[in-house]
Image (cartoon, rainbow, N blue to C red):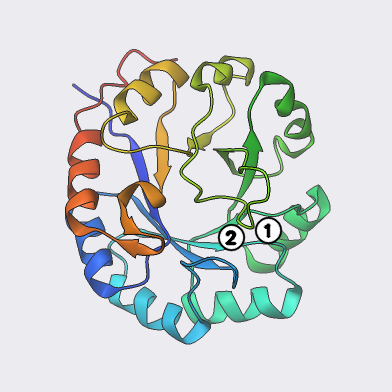
């Protein structure tokens, strides 16, 4: 029997895309709170999207170095199940958010080689999960969602008991290979299911999710 893989579709901004994500069997949906991103949603938008999703899926609020007031606003509007921190948030900030809001925190890191895990080590046991994305191209304004992949085999350098989502350059054509080579049990995608920056493509969402459900993680460590 195949194990079920966790799948997060990130950067959603319409009810239609949320419906496709839920219908396709994703476990998580992400809303982006970062004004430089083409996937950014306002607090008012996030409330409507979150209400539409109801309790049918885990809702992830993605922010980048959000200050206390903005984070309070995000949580009040969206009522997320998970906070994803995609900036340079410190270990102390992760602890503070977990204690204040009683929510699990997923800390994102951009990586390209095994030595990059050195910066992750202080967060192990503090963050509830990690998201590993490729380092953004030189000059890019976005910390993630750039559609860039990295060498998935470097995940062997991460301690086996550290929970994480694999991101960066994934799409229906390579997700099973990425899972096999990295050992990941959870994946995250944003630009790989878009027809233009910030514009989710329903067909691509459906294809990606259907493919993920066929990927075999039974023998992974």
- In what quadrant of the picture does the N terminus appear? top left
Q: Secondary structure at mark 2?
A: loop
Q: Which mark is residue 44?
A: none
- Of residues 96 and 26, which is closer to you in this image? 26
Q: Is residue 56 above or below residue 217?
A: below
Q: Quadrant of the C terminus?
A: top left
Q: Which residue is mark 2?
A: 103
- Give residue 135's position: percent from left, percent from top: 62, 38
* Relative horizontal placement of residue 109, taking residue 175 as reference (left or right): right
Q: Residues within 10 Å of mark 1 (few under 14, many from 20)?
A: some
Label drawn at residue 98: 1
Is 160 placed left or right of 191 in the picture? right
Q: Is residue 147 positioned above or below 149 on the image?
A: below
Instruction: Please tell me how crowded label 2 is: few (under 14), some (14-19), or many (20+) other residues with Cα within 10 Å.
Output: some
- Tag 2–tag 1 contact (CB < 8 Å): yes
Label whose residue precedes the other's in the sequence (2 or 1) = 1
Q: Relative to 111, say whether 206 is above or below.
A: below
Name the one closer to the observer, 147 or 221.
147
Residue at image x 47%, y 87%?
A: 44
| Relative horizontal placement of residue 216, taking residue 147 as reference (left or right) | left
Residue sticking out furthest to the front:
139
Q: Quadrant of residue 176?
A: top left
Q: Residue 212's x, y, as percent?
A: 25, 35
Indicate the quadrant where residue 198 lies: bottom left
**Residue 179 x/y as whole percent:** 38, 24
Q: Tell me which residue sits at (32%, 67%) in the image.
A: 55
Residue found at x 28% / y 49%: 26
Taking depth in this image into account, of 34 and 121 the one nearest to the observer is 34
């Amino acid at each position: 029997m195949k194990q079920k893989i966790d799948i997060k579709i990130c950067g959603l901004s319409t009810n239609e895309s949320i419906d496709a994500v839920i219908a396709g069997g994703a476990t998580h949906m992400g809303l982006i709170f970062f004004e430089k991103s083409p996937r950014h949603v306002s607090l008012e938008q996030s409330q409507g999207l979150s209400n539409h999703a109801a309790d049918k899926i885990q809702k992830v609020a993605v922010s980048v170095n959000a200050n206390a007031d903005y984070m309070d606003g995000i949580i009040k509007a969206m009522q997320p199940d998970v906070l994803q921190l995609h900036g340079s948030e410190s270990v102390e900030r992760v602890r503070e958010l977990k204690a204040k809001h009683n929510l699990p925190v997923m800390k994102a890191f951009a990586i390209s080689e095994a030595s990059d895990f050195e910066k992750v080590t202080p967060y192990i046991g503090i963050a509830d999960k990690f998201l590993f994305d490729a380092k953004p191209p030189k000059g890019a304004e976005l910390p993630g969602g750039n559609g860039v992949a990295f060498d998935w085999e470097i995940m062997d350098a991460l301690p086996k008991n550290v929970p994480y989502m694999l991101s960066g350059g994934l799409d229906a054509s390579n997700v099973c290979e990425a899972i096999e080579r990295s050992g990941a049990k959870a994946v995250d995608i944003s630009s790989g299911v878009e027809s233009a920056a910030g514009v989710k493509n329903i067909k691509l969402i459906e294809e990606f999710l259907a493919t993920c459900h066929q990927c075999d993680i039974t023998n992974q460590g």
